[in-house]
Amino acid sequence: MKKRIKYTNKVSLQSKLIRMFLLTSAVPILFLSFFSYYNISNTLKKTTMEFSENNLRQTGKNLEIWLESYEDLLYQIYTDDDVVSLVDKLNNEEDVPVAKNQLRRYLRGLLNTKEYIRSITIITSEGVIITYDQLTPVTIENSWIDNFSLSPDEIYEEISSDNKTHVFPTEYGANFANNDYFLFHISHRIIDYKDLDKKSGVAIVSIDEKFLRNVCLTQDELNEEVNSFNFIVDNKGRIISYINQNSLLNQVTDEMASLEERQEDYMEFIVGEGLFEKEYISINTYRDGALQWDIVNVSNQRDTITKLGKQQEIDIIVSLLSLTVVIVLTVILSRQLSNSIKQVVSTMQVASSGNLKIRVKADKQMPIEVESIALQFNDMLGKLDDAMKKEKKAGERQRQAEIRALEAQINPHFLYNTLDTINWMAIDKNEFDISNAISSLAAILRHAIKNSNITVEIRDEVQWLKNYIYLQQTRLKNSFRCEINVDPEVLDCKIHKLLLQPFIENSIIHGFAWAKKEHILEIEFKLKGELVHITVKDNGKGIEPSLVESYNNEVSHMTEDDNHIGIRNAISRLHMYYGDKASVHVSSTLGEGTVITLLIPWR
């Protein structure tokens, strides 16, 4: 009888293989699982931080763009000829009540043109304060100036010290309707282009702090969440925009501190606010180079970290239960995350090339953190696109306003001198000459004043020039001779009205001044190809070489005397009407004369 062998201490091959597999595969797989978790976590944190930094930079650009639109309105105020005239009257104590009333009506018309403007103020060099204000029961009283850190005299001195736009950070403005209002201010000295060095007053636009808060809105704030928000700190370390109004104007850092030191101060402030736990807070800072303000992003990473922790537990459990499932899940998760990030990054690359219409397409497989960043990036692109459209429209409106302003410049001295000449002719009782002069003057006025922005046929413009030159010859007692040569094929071509008058006036009034020789003015119209060639030639005293160079180089912003401002404005009008299709060339020799050549499209 055979003895049965008992294998009570033996282990089956299957068990050994399982144990060996567990020892040789499970530990490395678990290690790889941990490593994969931390690698994904770090990648996600790095990507989130990069997107946060990009968002801050874009917020800074949005702030600059939005502020520029308000600076355009400020520009309309401090360069307006009527404002300059009214402020001069106040400084000279002329018609003070009328001047104040007209200024207030003008400011009232501008106050509601843009959101968030709460007050517009003008301070004259004599200390007169004119305002239109939303934060007082009486709109003609100023709400904020008594609470401002600088006195009106100090405000005036600081703004009028240069030709720059001054931005005063947020300060307490006023309490109105049981609400506290905090305002920041943009300002500029009033400019009189007839006397650029004259200091007649300053213009101040006061903007609600809610404007800054709106610029800083994140996607979380738009969704009424509190996991992420932005706030702004000025160059003195004071909070000038914050989600909680009670914390405004708190000094949270030192103006001389480095970036690392400032971020530590911001961290300490947020911890003191008790909004988030310190270990979950992420602080990112962007420094606006123009304003020297810090735009600070505060993000609560608790949800992200908690989700990552749960993901780690799931990975461990799944790894223990099924190594295959762990591998599949790891591959799927990493692929999904990578594809989502690639999708967002590729969209950013397309947007950086100038296409602001593109959007990140979120799907169900996109992780919530990346989806939140994608939605925020989409929202940012939409705001930027809208801001650029508004900026373009504002630029077009400004261009039209500049054209109208240039066209509105009429030389009153010519009218006065001509009427004076007619008056003396009446005294001498030369009735035929008076009749001719009055008829020419009436034709000039009708042509110049009615629809001054339209085009007319060259034949009509030439007839007007003849009347104008006749009056000049009469006024100057026929001290010069004029020759006008026009090709017949040019007569039907179109030209903007009064375009040539400044060049001809310059030759007559300034070119022939003090010259002791026969004065000759030659005007010629020729058609060459697609262009009408117009030449104005005189044998007068000539133009200084520096002015000739400025005209030919189109340096229209330089300061010039009144003797040549007409030519500068005429060149500006020419380019506004015809763009790059037209050109002006000036050649002149002192003591010999000047030749001005204009090329304009005949169509």
Image (tube, grey):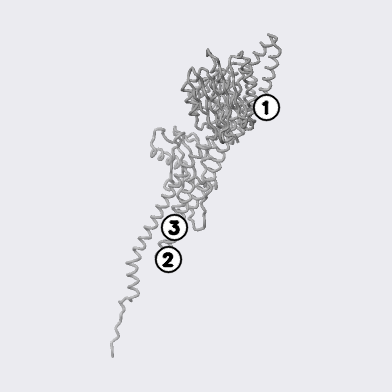
Residues under numbered marks 3 and 2 in contact, where contact means CB atoms less than 8 Å apart: no
| Spot occupied by residue 340 in the image (x, y as percentages of width and height) | 47, 55
Q: Is residue 489 visible?
A: yes
Q: Is residue 201 visible?
A: no
Using the image, determine if residue 345 lies above or below residue 600.
below
* Amino acid on which disc 1 is placed: Lys
Q: Quadrant of residue 484?
A: top right
Residues under numbered marks 1 and 2 in contact, where contact means CB atoms less than 8 Å apart: no
Q: Which mark is residue 450?
A: 1
Left or right relative to 49: residue 480? right
Residue corresponding to mark 3: 310
**Which tag is nearer the camera, tag 1 or tag 2?**
1
Using the image, determine if residue 466 lies above or below residue 287.
above
Question: Farthest residue toward the bottom?
Answer: 1
Q: Quadrant of residue 202?
A: top right
Q: Earlier in the sequence, mark 3 or mark 1?
A: 3
Residue corresponding to mark 2: 325
SS at mark 3? helix
Could you classify mark 3 by the number of other residues whose Cα lies within 10 Å: few (under 14), some (14-19), or many (20 or more)?
few
Separation of disc 3 and disc 1 at Cα? 79 Å
